[in-house]
Amino acid sequence: MADTSRRLAGTAYVTADGVSIMVAGQFQYRPSGVERTTLSGMDGVHGYSEKPVPGFISIQVRDNSGVTVEYFNGLTNTTVSAELANGKTIVGTGMWAVNTQDVNSEDATFTLRFESDSVKEY
């Protein structure tokens, strides 16, 4: 058996509401969190403002006959789960698809991006 203890990247297994997604590449994510902006005045630094930012999961998907592109476009209030090569599991709940899906017919791929206020790493 191969020693995978140092593997950091290279594979991602993704599901949306339990439906497997063919991951062609370019898997990206951002856990939900906050964005801080420094507040400065003419007399110095006053502090910072903070506002919530949504988390996201973005995937380059391979189009196949098992699931229609329209299915992905219609996903709202969805749970997206990903198992990564480094052992992390990324889970987004209450997610919605935010982009239109434009299929590149040369390699049967399209980008799928989900956002929500609840994306966590485990």
Image (cartoon, rainbow, N blue to C red):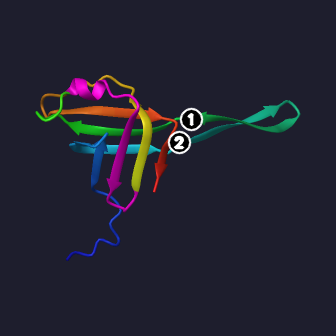
**Above or below: residue 102 compared with residue 56:** above
Q: Which residue: 24% across, 38% down? A: 61
Can you give x and y, in whole percent of width and height, for residue 63 in the image? 17, 34
Q: Residue at x 18, y 28 (%)?
A: 68
Horizontal and vertical percent position of residue 66: 13, 35
Q: Give above or below for 14 relative to 7.
A: above
Q: Residue at x 35, y 71 (%)?
A: 6
Q: Is residue 119 left or right of residue 65?
A: right
N-terminal label among 2 and 1: 2
Element at label 2: loop
Residue at mark 2 to residue at mark 1: CA–CA distance = 6 Å
Which amino acid type is shown beneath numbered disc 1? Val
Q: Residues within 10 Å of mark 1 (few under 14, many from 20)?
A: some
Residue 35, quarter of picture: top right
- Asked whether the residues under the numbered discs 2 and 1 touch, taking CB atoms below 8 Å apart as contact, a structural biologist would say yes
In the foreground, 4 or 114: 114
Residue under pointer 2:
32
Q: Which residues are magenta?
A: 69-88
